Image (spheres, helix red, strand yellow):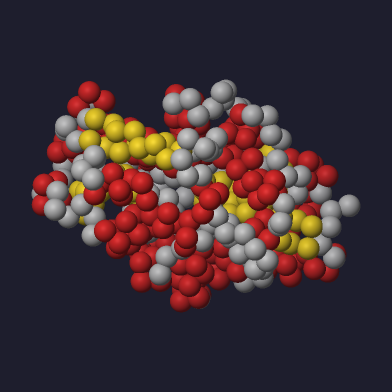
């Protein structure tokens, strides 16, 4: 019998942020005596590491695409039951006294000859930020017509692990990834900028807002990745996963979980001020910086779907990870995606 359901989420503005902070999940399961807890509350390091490994038997995760794709490639039995795609500010940034900053915004070809930093976490098996930066560099080459010979990719080796900056403790509904972790992600990359070892670094979303606010960095080249524009291939899917055994044994619990997330879009549109505070909290940003990392459409992008274009984007991300050695093998995403919970909950809403 399931007595506790666990969750984790990345520092992104999603329906999970709303459902967790509003207490909807706890309320939904309390009548059955089922506790709902964040893995950040667990004293067990292995439970907290499930944010990346996905190997907990009663875990829901709503976050970046790299960890679940890596977990599936390692044979972890999980299912993708939803995707989100929100606009995020993304691009390459230089310090304000750099010549590229003076010419900003630049055409993509202006980065010919630039030294671009590539962070490499030596202690992390799941180096999600390196994968993200590499995707940004590849998109730069695709939209500019430049080749890898036209730029210099400078490795920035980092011994600090992501979990060194995680937050764990008894706080209810907390996230592993608070302000401390967000402000720390690009620490070594910023140092490389100040030392003159690189000309530009990639940044996006909340990290870009933090970078610009703390260093005065200038976005010399913006990369668009909105779901409804011509460069949508650069988007970043946020993936909702659940352990496959839980879904197989208790689909009713998974449906109940999904139903709480589907409440979020309407609530957000009617409570923009409250939603702003929730999203700022979960992304580690001051409220005033939220729109520096995300677009003004943020409050209309809290949906959960398995739309074909989102699945196609996830396939492209898997191909990218395979090409760069982040995955030992690819997975049959069609087999890993389960439309059941979303379909049943939508039908229930219509009824």
Labels in figure, total: 0
Whether 122 is drawn above or below 185: the answer is: above
Q: Which one is nearer the viewer's eye here, 312 or 1?
A: 1
Q: Residue 125 at what x, y percent from top left?
A: 55, 35
- Relative image position of residue 47 (x, y in whole percent): 70, 49
Residue 308 appears in view: no
Does residue 71 sit above or below 201 in this rendering? above
In the depicted structure, whether residue 93 falls above or below residue 336: below
Q: Is 69 situated left or right of 296 in this image? A: right
Name the residue located 85 percent from the left edge and 65 percent from the top edge: 33
Quarter of the image with the C terminus is bottom right
Q: Is residue 33 visible?
A: yes
Determine the residue positioned at 26% across, 37% down.
116
Q: Residue at x 60, y 69 (%)?
A: 21
Identify which residue is drawn at 22% across, 23% down: 149
**Residue 233 percent across, percent down from the top left:** 38, 38
Res 38 → quadrant: bottom right
Q: Quadrant of residue 68?
A: top right
Tell me: 70 left or right of 42: left
């Amino acid at each position: 019998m399931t007595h506790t359901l666990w969750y984790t989420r990345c520092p992104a503005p999603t329906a999970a942020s709303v459902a967790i902070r509003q207490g909807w999940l706890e309320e939904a399961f309390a009548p059955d005596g089922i506790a709902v807890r964040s893995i950040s509350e667990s004293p067990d390091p292995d439970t907290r590491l499930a944010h990346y490994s996905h190997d907990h038997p009663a875990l829901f995760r709503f976050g970046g695409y790299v960890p679940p794709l890596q977990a599936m490639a390692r044979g972890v039995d999980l299912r993708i039951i939803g995707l989100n795609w929100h606009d995020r500010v993304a691009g390459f940034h230089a310090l304000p006294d750099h010549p590229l900053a003076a010419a900003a915004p630049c055409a993509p070809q202006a980065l010919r000859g630039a030294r671009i930093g590539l962070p490499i976490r030596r202690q992390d098996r799941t180096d999600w930020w390196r994968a993200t930066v590499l995707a940004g560099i590849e998109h730069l080459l695709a939209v500019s017509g430049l080749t890898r010979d036209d730029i210099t990719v400078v490795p920035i080796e980092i011994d600090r692990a992501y979990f060194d900056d995680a937050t764990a403790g008894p706080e209810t509904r907390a996230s592993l990834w608070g302000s401390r972790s967000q402000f720390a992600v690009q620490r070594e990359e910023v140092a490389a900028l100040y030392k003159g070892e690189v000309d530009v670094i990639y940044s996006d979303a909340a990290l870009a807002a933090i970078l610009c606010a703390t260093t005065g960095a200038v976005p010399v080249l913006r990369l668009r990745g909105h779901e409804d524009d011509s460069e949508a291939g650069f988007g970043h899917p946020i993936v909702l996963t659940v352990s496959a055994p839980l879904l197989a044994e208790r689909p009713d619990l998974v449906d109940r979980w999904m139903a709480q997330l589907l409440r979020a879009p309407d609530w957000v549109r009617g409570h923009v001020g409250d939603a702003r505070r929730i999203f700022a909290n979960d992304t580690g940003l001051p409220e005033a910086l939220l729109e520096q990392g995300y677009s003004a459409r943020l409050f209309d992008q809290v949906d959960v779907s398995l739309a074909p274009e989102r699945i196609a984007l996830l396939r492209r991300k898997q191909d990218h990870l395979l090409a760069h050695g982040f995955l030992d093998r690819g997975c049959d995403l069609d087999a890993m995606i389960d439309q059941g919970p979303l379909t049943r909950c939508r039908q229930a809403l219509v009824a």
